[in-house]
Amino acid sequence: MAKGSKTVFFCQECGYESSKWMGQCPGCKAWNSFVEEVVESKKAAQALSRSKNIEAPVTIAEISTEKDARIQTNIGELDRVLGGGIVAGSLTLVGGDPGIGKSTLLLQVCRNLAGLGRKVLYISGEESLRQIKLRAVRIGEFNNNLKLFCETNLDTIREVIKRENPEVTVIDSIQTMYNEEVSSAPGSVSQVRESTGVLMQIAKVLGISIFIVGHVTKDGNVAGPRVLEHMVDSVLYFEGDRHASYRILRGVKNRFGSTNEIGVFEMCANGLEEVKNPSEFMLSGKPEGASGSIVACSMEGTRPILIEIQALVAPSNFGIPRRTAAGTDFNRVNLLMAVLEKRARLNLSASDAYVNIAGGIRMNEPAIDLGIILAIVSSYRDVVIDEKTVAFGEVGLSGEVRAVSMAEQRVQEAKKLGFESVILPCACMKSVENIKGIRLLAVDNIKDAIRCIGA
Ligand SMILES: Nc1ncnc2c1ncn2[C@@H]1O[C@H](COP(=O)(O)OP(=O)(O)O)[C@@H](O)[C@H]1O
Ligand SMILES: [Mg+2]
């Protein structure tokens, strides 16, 4: 007999249930009416009932996608990261440090959707209704399509979702939710995982789009949402400098769109505001006439973003020079400095070097290599780079400047923001030669590039 099943005796006359056989039924007093039956445990029974209504496999043409039209949130930056809006029945995880603005953003989403006449349910396990109201007052006007609910018990939540049948539900946050069937505390890995499983089922069966908020803690004390990244459809992470007002929403997983797309927001008194032109935003406050500063171009998803790279190279007082990299990969900076030493004959071994992506944004695209190289040379030689110049290109170990993707978009972005010249890899020239009104300086290796900036 399969594990998890047991036998019970039923009275055929009245259905009386007994664990052992009896001659006379205590319920209906009938004689010799008991029969033995195998009863599956609850789980096995569920599996059985599920297997009964298995549907036949279908062809692609038979699947209708009409119902899955995307729901626009009217927050352009978020829609872009989601790949064009919310997909019906999808499960999205919004992660980020505490206090970065997850609840604020999702409440704004709720407000917009409610304003468009969609039923929205916001379930909070963290804040009281009063606290949510205080935030809502900050954000603006809400209509009655949005319902709020404070609860942490998933069984209750499931019932409420079934009863309300909203189109979109927000769960804030997964770390506070608990499932009675799991004995561990809320926030533990098994709770978080089980709870997500339950929400996944709700989303898929009822076709409700669910947003889950998950806190990420640096020291990893609380089970981070990373354990459930593989369960959900999309994962968005909120990043940002604690001290800066802008926030970046990055899509790291998306079953319905491209990843690596970013949305830029600014935290204002009345909630998160979209930053429509991040390049302009990132370049505000760029110093004029200072050495060690250059504008580089990085692609974030489908969008080019211009950023300022700063370098400070100063004589070292110690035998081992200090190097730091803020906003980009430290090892990459070390590698580029080694390339400069070997291929451009710069003696950097006695210099401290500090490289910084201004504004606190993180950029790891190889296309900013050339910018980092030129910023370091500019600071080392104390040569000011023309402030209307943008540079992009990947730098290889032999000092060659290699092609990068989407050169055209990068040059167009530079042109749009009023830059006058672009230093770019020779191999990219073909795709941009039709662009007029901006000087294109094609370089083959870093020596050429250094010559371009007059150092
Ligand atoms: N009046 C305000 N003006 C500007 N920013 C505010 C204001 N009130 C709150 N904030 C910002 O909102 C943040 C709280 O956002 P919240 O959505 O609660 O974060 P999370 O849900 O990610 O923990 C605070 O860290 C603060 O920076
Ligand atoms: Mg919150």
Image: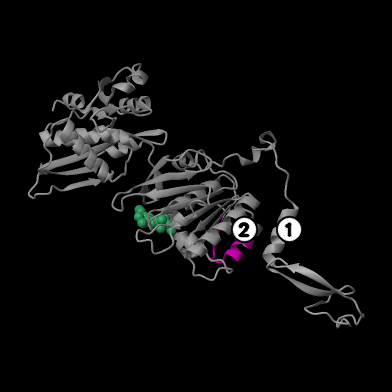
**Nearer mark to the viewer, of 1 and 2:** 1
Q: Secondary structure at mark 2?
A: helix
Please tell me which of labels 1 and 2 falls first in the chain: 1
Q: Which residue is mark 2?
A: 161
Q: Quick one: 118 or 187, which is closer to the camera?
A: 187
Q: Quadrant of residue 300?
A: top left
Image position, residue 335 (x, y; %): 23, 39
Is 31 left or right of 325, judged from the image as shown? right
Residue appearing at x 13%, y 47% in the figure: 321
CB of mark 2 near ligand 2 (< 8 Å): no
Estimate the x, y position of residue 402 in percent, counting from the top left: 30, 28
Residue 136 in view here: no
Segment colored magenta: 147-159
Question: Does 337 sit above or below residue 442?
Answer: below
Secondary element at tag 1: helix
Residue at the outermost front position = 1
- Of residue 271 and residue 123, the one placed in the foreground of this image is 123
Quarter of the view holding residue 310 = top left
Res 65 label: none
Q: Residue furthest right?
A: 31
Label 2 Cα neighbours within 10 Å, binned few <14 / some 14-19 / many ≥20:
some
Percent from the top left, x then y, of residue 358? 25, 42
Q: Amino acid at mark 1?
A: Ser
Residue 73, percent from left and from top = 51, 43
The front one of 105 and 172 is 172
Quarter the C terminus occupies: top left
Which quadrant is home to the N terminus? bottom right
Mark 1, Cα crowd under 10 Å, few <14 / some 14-19 / many 20+, is few
Question: What residue would you read off at disc 1?
Answer: 49
Identify the residue at horizontal 49%, vertical 42% (top origin).
82
